[in-house]
Amino acid sequence: MDRKFGSNFMVGLAAGLYPFLHYYNGNFDLADSWVQFFFLFGICLVLPHILMAISPFVFKLKFLRKFEKYRRTAVNLILFFGLIGLLIFLFKKKALAVTLLGAGLLSFVVYKQLAKIVILQLLLAVLSVFTLVPKLLFMSSYTDEWTAQADAISETVFKTHPNIYLIQPDGYSSFKHLKAPPYNAPDTTFQVTLENSGFTLYNDFRSNYYSTLTSNASMFAMKHHYYDNTYRGNLKTYGAQDVVVGEDNVAVQILKKNGYKSHLLTDNSYFLVNRKNSMFEYCNVPQEQVLLWDTGGISGIDIAADFEKLLETTSDSHNFFFIEKTVPSHIMYGEGASLGIPAERERYFERLKMADEWLTALLTQIEAHDKNALVIIAADHGGYVGLSYVKEVETRKLTEEETVSVFNSLLAIKWPHGEAPAYLDLDSNVNLFRNVFAYLGEKPSLLENLEPDTSYLPLYQGSKAIFYECINDAYQVVYKPLDE
């Protein structure tokens, strides 16, 4: 009996151990909460043993008795391939069902090889341990000390308290660069719309980092992290959600000290997957709609409709809204999905038109509700037009034109009462909030501790990336190794 139990235990363990370890290998940056750990532990390391324990009773059913000899192999393979399909390849329902069916049918062919299958699965798990350990060490050494400020900005007392709307259209390039190569935009009429609405455009604005998480982390922390939070082996950024929506969001901390309520509106689970949202009192995405193991767009979410309802219930002042939508986004991420430079450019402009329509509707809502708000449209990075695919930045040094395409980004601000402060220094995301707080607190001295307006990119050399300062403080493309 003990030997049989041990055999069943190994069959169940082998089915889920590799998917569990492999998932953490690739997603340690997004799956660092206890709720995710217990969920993954449950489906990978508890569920297999439960199914192994009840399967003998199920197979006593009359029509299943003749399949008893395939039972343990079937349970093992269905779980193994099912978990890989769900957690690693992120299969949808139909693809997952086909995978489960295929695994079940395969058990009829290989049931005599179960011992070898179990040994192979355990060997894969052992290999995963070796690659996971360095990542766990990186996670354990991470500290949020980089978010510490050089002065007492956290004690800033605002003199005025307008509602603040920070709208982030993902990947929206600045109008200046949209008109120039490699964009050569066919239509920039939205620029006229903004100017006629009283917005000030900051034409040479750029992001400091090339991805949404790395860029937003530095923006809300008002500090450079210099990729100290990014694992060089796979460029996964750790702790970024804590800085964007969690307790390390320095900018929202300061807003709260000044009596602001914070509201997050998005149609994506990118900031929410690991349940770190503690800084925003309202979020339009119900947490139960966010998967524990995957990020992406949330079906059924309408930011404009959610925003309209929120405006009807909020107070007249002291509100901060962070509104993020993945349009126009950027060119395709991987080489395999790219349609080539010309086609990717055309697709970008199709999405840019969608972004313009969405922004126009959103601004109309704000104008109808709030005449003297502080409205900030700030993209997280550029659109990458001129490259074949996003990950190309990791494989070769970009040209000056390509580098600027990655980082140039839209910043347009409608200041309360139409008064654009002349003393501000708005050149990059990392200094956005420090400038805003200098304005609201009527405290220009805060600008004495601006971060450098430098931009950074990773470039693989072998199996690990080297981080480069690719744009200096004067907006010159330099490609200087960060470690120097």
Image (spheres, rainbow, N blue to C red):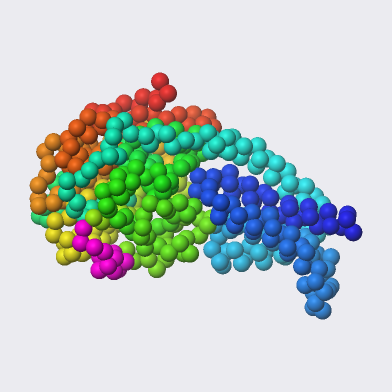
Q: What residue is rendered at 66% in x and 64% in y? A: 100
Task: Kindly tell me whether residue 121 is visible in this rendering.
Answer: yes
Residue 364 lies in quadrant: bottom left
Residue at the bottom extreme of this rendering: 62
Residue 172: x and y, percent?
28, 49
Residue 450: x and y, percent?
26, 32
Residue 281 lies in quadrant: bottom left
By secondary structure, the bulk of the magenta-drawn segment is best described as helix
Please tell me whether residue 372 is drawn above or below residue 135 in the rendered image: below
310 falls in the magenta region: yes
* Near-viewer residue (443 or 27): 443
Q: What residue is rendered at 65% in x and 37% in y? A: 130
248 falls in the magenta region: no
Specify start and end residues of the magenta stretch as a single range.
305-317
Task: Kindly tell me whether residue 107 is visible in this rendering.
Answer: no
Please tell me whether residue 62 is drawn above or below residue 375 in the rendered image: below
